Image (spheres, helix red, strand yellow):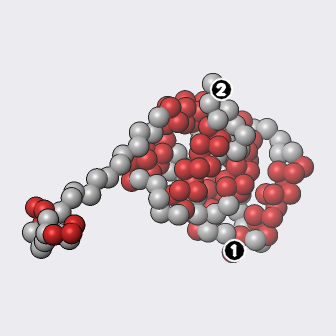
Amino acid sequence: MGEIGVHSGNTADRPRATRRVYPLGPGLGHARAYAATHGHLACSKDTRHDDFALGDWLTQKRRAARQGRLSPTTTHALEAIDPWWCPPWPHTWQRTYQQAKLHHHTGQDHLPALQRWTEQQRTHWNTLHPSQQELLSAIGIHRST
């Protein structure tokens, strides 16, 4: 270092930038366990898993991902659990889709609200993201003719 705290051009004299790495903590384990039971991470904000605020934790991770502040390690870990954990469309759509998917796979009749949602997807098919169209098609929901 030169006089009065000015760095010389020598990089060896410069302080090293340190990068903080924050552990994922218990959130990732709870996310894995929740997805193992439910098949997805599209839970509501108030979802708790074994007394852990999983819904709130995932909401914070989605927000950070959309702002470009989520580490690649965390992103990859969550994508490995559920590729659609942070979709480019509204999370409420993803949660409703998961309900429709569950009804489809179990053969349950759709509740009236879910029937209305399904009809809206058919009617507004052309406004959906191509991946949304693929997800819907996989469970037998197609564009209105």
Residue in the foreground of this view, choosing between 89 and 125: 89
Look at label 1 and name its amino acid: Thr
Q: Name the residue located 65 percent from the left edge and 41 percent from the top edge.
A: 55
Q: Is residue 140 visible?
A: no
Residue 85 coordinates in the image, percent (x, y): 56, 50
Q: What distance separates the C-alpha of mark 2 from that of mark 1?
A: 39 Å
Furthest-front residue in view?
4
Answer with left or right where residue 31 lies relative to residue 49: left
Residue 80 falls in image quadrant: top left
Foreground: disc 2 or disc 1? 2
Classify 10 Å Cα crowding around label 2: few (below 14), some (14-19), many (20 and above): few
Q: Where is residue 72? Give x, y as percent.
A: 39, 53
Residue marked by disc 2? 51
Q: Nearer the viewer, residue 132 or 42?
A: 42
- Nearer to the camera, 103 or 80: 80
Q: Which residue is mark 1?
A: 127
- In the image, is residue 51 above or below residue 69? above
The quadrant in which the N terminus is found is bottom left
Residue 117, horizontal then vertical, whole percent: 81, 57
- Image-based side of 97 in relation to 23, left or right: right
Give the SS element for disc 1.
Answer: helix
Across and down, in percent, residue 133 comes to 63, 64
The extreme top residue here reads 50
Residue most extreme to the right = 112
Compare marks 2 and 1 and give the one earlier in the sequence: 2
Secondary structure type for disc 2: loop
Determine which quarter of the picture holds residue 119: bottom right
> Which residue is drawn at the image coordinates 71% and 44% (left, top)?
44
Q: Is residue 67 visible?
A: yes
